Image (cartoon, grey):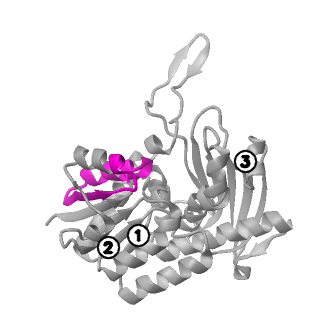
Amino acid sequence: MTIGLALIGAGRIGKVHARAIAQTPGAKLVAVTDALAEAASGLAAQYDAAVKTIDAIEADADVAAVVICSPTDTHADLIERFARAGKAIFCEKPVDLSVARVRACLAVVRAEKAKLMLGFNRRFDPHFRAVKAAIDAGRIGTVEMVQITSRDPAPPPPAYAAVSGGIFRDMTIHDFDMARFLLGGEVETVQASAAAIVDPEIGRAGDFDSASIILTTADGRQCQISNSRRATYGYDQRIEVLGSKGAVSAENQRPVAIEIADAEGFHRPPLHDFFMTRYIEAYAAEISHFVAAIENGTAIAPDGEDGLKALIIAEAALLSVASGRRVALSEI
């Protein structure tokens, strides 16, 4: 059985998912659409797919599922449209920048009994999954504290910051999902501090480029998150989990895992330069999970509710920065 998938959006992340689909047994990219005709035709030709309109994709019986990689402000409408059309849906995060709009969208997904998966790819990183497996196996006892370091090599253009939804909804939202994934429980309160110290223009656009966040569960367990839009040494992605019996961690990854020792010391190659190479295995694994869930009728995770919960944490973080206090998620 081959699952036919259509790609909505042929930009940077769309290309990543097209490659992942091509690498997934039982999956076939059959259609591509994009507001830019040249982008759609180029990607479609690369993977022997057809260029189709959204209307044609909706009506195409050979399309069992769609992968939404279009701009954020189109996500909710597209999810609702394809849910009503009976297609399985994979959507890049977030569903929307508005909590109320996400809730309305998920109500449609539930009513249509549609399959919806959110693109929190870090859950599928083999190193992070190994950390989760160690936790689930009881190797470190009960999880007590989580430390997440997530820093980009360089800040985005201020124009991007102005439309992205801000650092918490755009960047830290991945860390909020990872915190829930590793804590194994729900966050109750958020304390956040943020500033624009890398690029003042980002601050003038109403966003931040540096943030520290503490998430706390109802039973007092904590996750500390360190974010920066500037890590001159590369794409910094680390996690550590402390438990009652020990700790487990995942260190930074490099394209080449070697170390050279000479008279001047020990030397290792640089880190990955951004998410498209650091998480290439994760992108392939999440599409494989999505296709397997369609084939086998199994549950999908992360789903729309996971996306909503991460967005609520992001909103609480914004309120915490604005108010200078700890914010309960129940306030959102």
Q: In the drawing, does residue 44 fall left or right of residue 206?
A: left
Q: In the drawing, does residue 83 fall left or right of residue 273?
A: left
* Residue on which the image places disc 1: 117
Give the x, y percent position of residue 245: 60, 61
How far apart, in angstroms, are the residues tagged by discs 3 and 2? 37 Å
Give the x, y percent position of residue 275: 49, 45
**Which element type, helix, strand or loop, lies under badge 1?**
strand
* Residue on which the image places disc 2: 88
Q: Is residue 20 magenta?
A: yes
Q: In the drawing, does residue 20 fall left or right of residue 245?
A: left
Q: Mark 3 and mark 1 in contact (Cβ < 8 Å)?
A: no
Q: Mark 1 or 3 closer to N-term?
A: 1
Q: Amino acid at mark 2?
A: Ala
Q: Is residue 97 magenta?
A: no
Q: Mark 3 or 2 closer to N-term?
A: 2
Magenta highlight range = 10-39
Q: Mark 1 and mark 2 in contact (Cβ < 8 Å)?
A: yes
* Residue on which the image places disc 3: 202
Q: Amino acid at mark 1?
A: Met
Between 265 and 275, the residue placed more toward the observer is 275
